[in-house]
Amino acid sequence: MIRIENVYKSFGALEVLKGIDMTVGKGEVVCIVGPSGSGKSTLLRSLNHLERITSGRIFIDNVLLDDRQDDRDIQRPANREVNALCSEIGMVFQRFNLFPHLTALENVMLGPVVVKKAAQEDAKRDAIELLAKVGLSDKMDVYPSKLSGGQQQRVAIARSLAMKPKIMLFDEPTSALDPELVGEVLNVIRDLAKQDMTLLIVTHEMAFAREVADRVVFMDEGRIVEIDTPEKIFGSPSHERTKRFLGQVLNKSA
C-alpha cells in the first residue's frame, strides 16, 4: 500500500528526513517509535502531502504520489490524481481539530458531504454507524466543548473513517490526552487493527505498539535505525541506539 524510496525532507538548513526507505503492505499495522525530533511526524505528513518531500519517491497503492529531487518535481501527477490519492488516506492528529460550531454527528458528516458530494441522508447514516463504532452513540448531538479529550479524539477518528480511507495515519493520537483517557482511544485503534485496515501509527505507547503492530520502526535523527517484529524490537533489538532508547523509555514507565 505504501512504498517510500530514499526520501529526504529539509526545512531550510535543517534536514529532518535523511534517506527513508520502507514499505507497508495492505492490511499491515506499523508503529513508528523513537525520540522526539527524529522525523516521525514529518514522515507521516509527507504521505498525504501536508509536507512536500525534498527528494525521493512515494507510491500509494502502486500509484506515484511524489517524485522529487532538490525540492523540484521530477514527475508530477495531475492535481486530480494527487487529490484522489490523498482522499484515500485518513489522518488523526495529536490535536482533535474538530469544528467547534458543529455537533459530533455534523463533524463526521462534513467530509463526505463537502468533499465526496455524498447525499446528506447517506452521510448521516454512515456517521451514526461510525460514532457507534467508536462508542459515542449517546454523544451525536453534543458539541466538542462538551466532550472530554478522549471523546473528541474518537470523533476525530470517526471523521477520518467517514472518508472510507484505504490507509489511516495516526500521529501520536494520545499525546494530548490525560492519562486516564488514553485507553479509550487506544481501544478504538485496536479494533481497527483487527479489521484488515492499513495503519501507520506514531506513538510513545510502547506496550500498545508491542501489542498491535505487525512491525515496529525505530527512527532516530531522521533515519530508520531498524525495522522488525515487535518481538524482535522489544525483546532483542539489533542496534545499540534502539537498546538505549527502549531502556530509557521502558525504565521511565516502569
Image (spheres, helix red, strand yellow):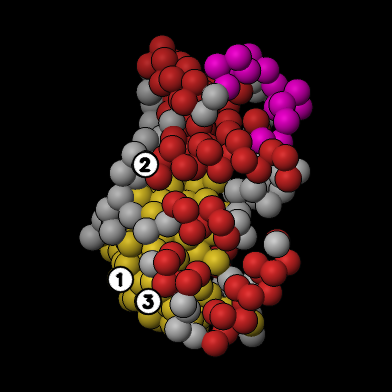
Q: Amino acid at mark 1?
A: Gln
Residue 254, x across and y down, in percent = 70, 62
**Residue at image coords 69%, 69%:** 251
Tell whether label 2 touches label 3 (CB within 8 Å).
Answer: no
Magenta segment: 136-150
Residue 137, x across and y down, in percent = 55, 16
Q: Amino acid at mark 2?
A: Lys
Estimate how packed mark 3 is, as few (under 14), some (14 to 19) or many (20 or more) residues with alpha carbons within 10 Å: some
Q: Quadrant of the N terminus?
A: bottom left
Q: Is residue 158 above or below residue 172?
A: above
Q: Amino acid at mark 3?
A: Asp
In the depicted view, which residue is nearer to us: 242 or 170? 242
Q: Is residue 43 above or below residue 171?
A: below
Estimate how packed mark 2 is, as few (under 14), some (14 to 19) or many (20 or more) residues with alpha carbons within 10 Å: few
- Looking at the image, tell me whether mark 2 or mark 1 is earlier in sequence order: 1
The residue pinned by badge 1 equals 75
Give the Cα separation between the discs numbered 2 and 1: 36 Å
Residue 131, x across and y down, in percent = 51, 23
Question: Which disc is residue 21 wearing?
Answer: 3
Label 2: element kind: loop
**Residue at image coords 36%, 41%:** 194
**Residue at image coords 38%, 80%:** 6
Give the Cα separation between the discs numbered 3 and 2: 26 Å
- Please identify, in this view, whether the residue under mark 2 or under mark 1 is nearer the observer: 2
Is residue 247 among the parts visible in the rendering?
yes
The residue pinned by badge 2 equals 194
Residue 148, x across and y down, in percent = 73, 31
In the depicted view, which residue is nearer to us: 142 or 13? 142
